[in-house]
Image (cartoon, helix red, strand yellow):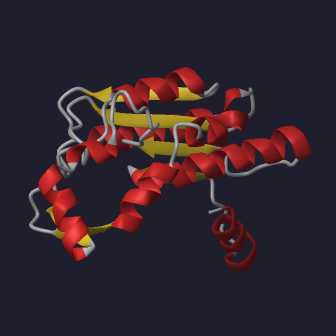
Amino acid sequence: LLTVIDFVTNSIGCQVRCVIGHSKGSASILNCASNVARQELEDGKDVTCKCFVNLAGRYRVPEIHDPLSKFGEEQRAEMMKKGFFEITSAWGDGRIFKVTKEDLDAYKLQSVADTPKVLVHLRKDSSVRVLTIHGHQDEVVSVQNAFRFDEEIANHSLHVIKQANHNFNGTKYLDEMVEQIVTFYNSVYNET
């Protein structure tokens, strides 16, 4: 992501001032935010992208959500027989996903230590700020993850939408989310 920001800034001539990620995409923006904070804190680099928005991101708290727990014995047996099993999208859109042993192994490799390691530079006071927006009714990533980010990140703002699910009920809460992001952005750059 830092390479993309650098390319957009230096090759296209546009300034990237805010990056937004949803769900698994939030892991990338948080990693980028931490690297930007490191550049500022350790290298003394003046950073232009200081605003990062985490939409329904996962902290990886195993006692709250274990991704392997949703797969049953029948699915494991199918994997042993075929080398994979299929699951239907939880969002009711009819998509079918093929889950392989490699997919399950990848989940195992993503340990609890990953998120705290990524956030190490965000625990310190820098000009980098993170906004987390999370639905209280999120059925995919528990809202407890948002509260964990709020505890761990020094310059953090949290907005929980009481009735929103993981995808924020489509566009139902879009105006509220945009208002929160614009307000946050303006506070980061002292703009009104």
Q: Which residue corresponds to the image point at 27% horizontal and 46% vertical from the top-left?
A: 174
Q: Which residue corresponds to the image point at 31% horizontal and 39% vertical from the top-left?
A: 141
How many discs appear?
Answer: 0
Residue 11 is situated, as x and y percent measured from the top left of the image, at 72, 79
Q: Is residue 133 visible?
A: yes
Left/right placement of residue 48 relative to residue 40 reads left
**Where's the N terminus, which quadrant?**
bottom right
Q: Residue furthest top?
A: 151
In this rendering, the answer to whether 97 lies above or below 28 is below
In this rendering, the answer to whether 48 lies above or below 96 is above
Left/right placement of residue 51 relative to residue 106 reads right
Q: Is residue 189 visible?
A: no
In this rendering, the answer to whether 15 lies above or below 158 is below
Left/right placement of residue 186 relative to residue 139 reads right
Residue 180 is situated, as x and y percent measured from the top left of the image, at 40, 36
**Where's the C terminus, which quadrant?**
top right
Left/right placement of residue 115 relative to residue 49 reads left
In this rendering, the answer to whether 95 lies above or below 123 is below
Quadrant of the rendered structure where residue 156 is? top right
Q: Residue furthest bottom?
A: 11
Q: Which residue corresponds to the image point at 43% horizontal and 58% vertical from the top-left?
A: 105
The residue nearer to you, when weighing 6 against 185, is 6
Residue 68 is situated, as x and y percent measured from the top left of the image, at 31, 47
Q: Which residue corresponds to the image point at 27% horizontal and 73% vertical from the top-left?
A: 83
